[in-house]
Image: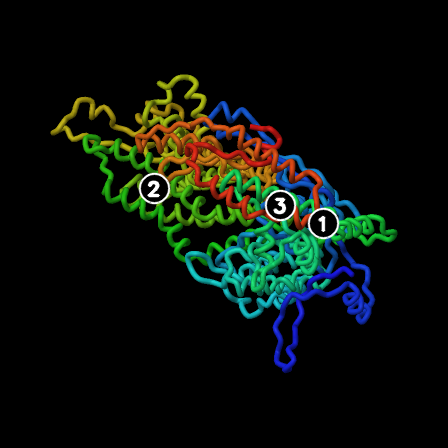
């Protein structure tokens, strides 16, 4: 009779409380248990995955090593993965590679940078590409939450973005029910918190992330490493909570790292992955029995999860260990694919596909509000979160004023005497007003927007809204702060240094200075939608601002004296119109004096401000209104460009594989700085070039990328022979899979041989077997 392991309480003869241990339980006994209870009912929902495979094509070398960069090789991330889960079950996926990519494939979040094959079925019906987002809820490994909102506010705003036909009272009831379901009611009015100030605990943050997904009543929930960063007790509580959610007629699939042994009886099904292959998938009791029959029994007082993951992992510390452990893993995989457990799982998949009356696909709530309503919710959420940052608001309003204090202290007071710098000082203030304003806006965007961008990336993948709506919400939110900050700056500087004493001119000056400040922040946000690295965006905005000042301001060189190409380019810079407007505002109608007692050659040639306008900016007075219109036209133009860039970011998110992380096979080290090639060739080459040249120039070190040294033929033959033996049919698994002490001794002696050159990179086993260099 077939047997399987089960966790049971063993009662001693003296009647004392027994301890839990793994015991053999026959299938007949299990059937008796099933007959004693209720008749098993057909699951209301089931998820089937059939033959999922995923491969990516990679460059062999980094971009700075052109010979190897031109070569490509194919990497297998997933290989024929099939599984089946019914409603009411929680599946835990263990292993060292392929877990997150499998979740991404199930959730439809695998991009186009690789080749994906296979099918995903819900209730026996194949999902279309556009249906994945409406069927699955995906909780990422990181908790992207707004720090200054409370738990209840966070969930309320999420519900308002997801649910349209619900009234405010219904949404509040829905949020209260979800908080009660996840034991969050006691922290409903506590702020989320962050690294700057304390808030709720890590486990509570994770539950808030899960609660945000439950608001749409999903029937299938996928969670990527929900216990990462949590202590053992909190992680155990999170998994127990997920098991309770699964028992409420849901399907829960979890990737988990190093679970406690107590969780052995919590999971309904356990899957173990290694090198993209499904080594085992079945019930916990079946797992113990399967590995025991393969000759790998779980020792007493050991965690079965740790033991079996170790047995199925590939050790890459040396070529010999990699070959031996890969052979063992492949043999266990072959044994599983020949087992009754695997055939039973395939039978469940086929039965779900052949059901006569298939239930409908359980989509999430599709009652999404209109685009304008979403924009209004995002604007209120962003404003409430950022307005609670008192220090941030104070610095945002005062940073321009602080800069104005430096300028006013340096200039002190403007004079009308030409010999005392009347013209030069005024031009200097105009230059500082136009040149410095974009930088303050840039600093605001770099400090605030990346956190909002990370949240929008996650929530847009969940289908709550589009990224461009978050972009517009942020822009509308910054307008009052920008207007107030610039008005404080101009009110102080304009009157403190004694510029043209006219109220209308002051309003014109303020209106002109406002635009560069907003453009600096707007341009930074637009670039942050294209480039991920804020440091690179800082560099880009600074270079664009400097180029605009040089070409458009006319301070360094008169526009009429520049080459024709630069004259045409000046019309594309906001600095041209800003400087012309401020020159006219300040110098028109202004009369200068000249100290005749100390004459300077040509100093008294300028007696009126109109001379400055006519000489440096001919026709600026007649273009005053047109310059205003053209200057403010930069704002809607940049907003439109930003919407386009974030729509492109939405499209690129579909083409990117979030779960696949390329191993660090191509790493170039410059002292403490590391430059790595990116995922799917989407690394920013410009950033790499700039960083590489700067570091090597500063350190005075020129490094070169040595050619890779292929492994010797003897090593290749060893790997091929071991892999061939792993793929061939042979005697029973128990005798095949045991590694002899002599073999281990041989591996240890091989490890003691002299090491090869440091730059030698061991090729992966799959690449060696396929003959690719």
Q: Which residue is mark 2?
A: 502
Question: Of tags 1 and 2, which is closer to the observer?
Answer: 1
Q: Nearer the viewer, residue 498 or 130?
A: 130
Residue projecting furthest to the bottom: 14
Q: Position of residue 332 (x, y in %)?
A: 66, 47
Cα gap from disc 1 to disc 2, whole angstroms: 77 Å
Q: Position of residue 449 (x, y in %)?
A: 48, 46
Tell me the tag on residue 83: 1
The relative height of residue 622 versus residue 469 in the rendered view (above or below) is above
The relative height of residue 756 versus residue 749 in the rendered view (above or below) is above
Q: Nearer the viewer, residue 322 or 65?
A: 322
Give the crowd class for mark 3: few <14, some 14-19, many >=20 residues within 10 Å. Answer: many
In this picture the colour scheme is rainbow
Q: Position of residue 549 (x, y in %)?
A: 37, 30
Q: Quadrant of the N terminus?
A: bottom right
Question: Of tags 1 and 3, which is closer to the observer?
Answer: 3
Toward which corner of the image does residue 240 lie, by quadrant? bottom right
Residue at the spot 31% in from the left edge and 32% down from the top edge = 698
Cα gap from disc 1 to disc 3, whole angstroms: 19 Å
Residue projecting furthest to the front: 742
Question: Of tags 3 and 2, which is closer to the observer?
Answer: 3
In the rendered structure, the answer to whether residue 514 lies left or right of residue 187 reads left
Q: Secondary structure at mark 3?
A: helix
The relative height of residue 662 versus residue 187 in the rendered view (above or below) is above
Q: Quadrant of the C terminus?
A: top right
Q: Which residue is mark 3?
A: 329
Give the crowd class for mark 2: few <14, some 14-19, many >=20 residues within 10 Å. Answer: few
Tell me if label 1 and label 2 are in contact, CB under 8 Å: no
Confirm whether residue 330 shows in the render.
yes
């Amino acid at each position: 009779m077939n047997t399987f392991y089960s966790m049971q309480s063993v009662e001693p003869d003296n009647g004392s409380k027994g301890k839990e241990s793994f015991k053999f339980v026959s299938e007949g006994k299990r059937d008796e248990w099933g007959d004693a209870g209720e008749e098993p009912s057909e699951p209301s929902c089931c998820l089937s995955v059939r033959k999922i495979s995923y491969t990516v094509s990679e460059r062999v070398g980094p971009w700075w090593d052109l010979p190897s960069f031109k070569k490509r090789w194919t990497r297998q991330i997933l290989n024929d993965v099939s599984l089946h889960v019914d409603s009411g079950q929680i599946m835990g996926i263990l292993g060292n590679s392929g877990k997150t990519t499998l979740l991404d494939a199930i959730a439809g979040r695998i991009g186009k940078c690789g080749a994906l094959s296979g099918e995903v079925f819900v209730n026996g019906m194949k999902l279309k590409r556009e249906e994945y987002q409406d069927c699955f809820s995906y909780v990422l490994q990181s908790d992207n939450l707004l720090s200054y909102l409370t738990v209840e506010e966070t969930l309320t705003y999420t519900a308002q973005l997801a649910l349209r036909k619900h009234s405010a009272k219904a949404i509040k009831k829905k949020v209260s029910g979800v908080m009660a379901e996840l034991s969050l009611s006691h922290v409903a009015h506590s702020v989320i918190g962050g690294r700057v100030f304390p808030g709720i605990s890590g486990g509570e943050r994770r539950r808030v992330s899960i609660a945000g997904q439950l608001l749409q009543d999903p029937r299938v929930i996928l969670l990527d490493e929900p216990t990462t960063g949590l202590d053992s007790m909190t992680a155990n509580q999170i998994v127990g909570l997920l098991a309770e959610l699964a028992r409420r007629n849901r399907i829960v699939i979890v990737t988990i790292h190093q679970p406690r042994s107590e969780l052995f009886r919590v999971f309904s099904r356990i899957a173990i992955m290694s090198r993209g292959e499904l080594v085992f998938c079945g019930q916990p009791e079946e797992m113990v029995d399967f590995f025991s029959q393969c000759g790998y029994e779980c020792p007493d007082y050991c965690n079965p999860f740790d033991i079996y993951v170790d047995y199925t992992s590939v050790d890459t510390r040396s070529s010999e260990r990699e070959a031996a452990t890969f052979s063992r893993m492949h043999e266990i995989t072959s044994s599983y694919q020949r087992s009754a457990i695997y055939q039973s799982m395939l039978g469940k998949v086929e039965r779900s596909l052949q059901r006569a009356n298939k239930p409908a696909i359980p989509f999430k709530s599709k009652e999404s509000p209109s685009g304008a309503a979403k924009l209004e919710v995002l604007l209120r959420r962003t404003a409430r979160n950022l307005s609670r940052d008192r220090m941030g608001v104070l610095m945002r309003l005062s940073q321009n004023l602080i800069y104005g204090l430096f300028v006013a202290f340096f200039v002190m007071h403007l004079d009308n005497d030409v010999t005392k710098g009347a013209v030069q000082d005024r031009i200097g203030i105009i230059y500082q007003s136009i040149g410095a304003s974009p930088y303050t806006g840039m600093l605001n965007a770099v400090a605030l927007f990346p956190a909002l961008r990370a949240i929008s990336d996650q929530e847009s993948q969940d289908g709550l809204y589009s990224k461009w709506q978050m972009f517009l919400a942020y822009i509308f939110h910054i307008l009052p702060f920008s207007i107030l900050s610039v008005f404080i700056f101009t009110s102080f500087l304009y009157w403190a240094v004694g510029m043209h004493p006219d109220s209308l001119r002051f309003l014109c000056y303020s209106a002109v200075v406002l635009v560069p400040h907003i453009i600096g922040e707007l341009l930074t946000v637009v670039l942050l939608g294209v480039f991920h690295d804020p440091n690179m965006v800082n560099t880009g905005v600074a270079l664009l601002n400097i180029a605009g000042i040089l070409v458009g301001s006319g301070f360094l060189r008169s526009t009429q004296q520049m080459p024709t190409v630069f004259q045409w380019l000046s019309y594309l810079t906001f600095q041209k119109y800003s400087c012309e407007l401020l020159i006219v505002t300040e110098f028109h109608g202004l009369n200068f004096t000249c100290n005749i007692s100390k004459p300077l050659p040509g100093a008294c040639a300028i007696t009126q401000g109109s001379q400055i306008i006519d000489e440096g900016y001919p026709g600026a007075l007649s273009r005053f209104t047109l310059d205003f219109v053209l200057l403010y036209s930069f704002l809607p133009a940049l907003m439109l460009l930003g919407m386009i860039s974030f729509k492109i970011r939405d499209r690129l998110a579909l083409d990117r594989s979030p779960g696949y992380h390329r191993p660090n096979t191509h790493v170039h080290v410059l002292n403490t700085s590391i430059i790595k090639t990116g995922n799917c060739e989407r690394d920013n080459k410009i950033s790499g070039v700039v960083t590489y040249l700067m570091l090597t120039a500063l350190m005075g070190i020129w490094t070169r990328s040595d050619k890779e040294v292929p492994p010797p033929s003897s090593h290749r033959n060893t790997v091929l022979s071991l892999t061939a033996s792993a793929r061939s049919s042979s005697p029973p698994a128990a005798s095949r899979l045991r590694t002899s002490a002599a073999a281990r001794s041989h591996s240890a002696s091989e490890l003691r041989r002299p090491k090869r050159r440091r730059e030698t990179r061991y090729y992966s086993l799959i690449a060696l077997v396929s003959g690719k260099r």
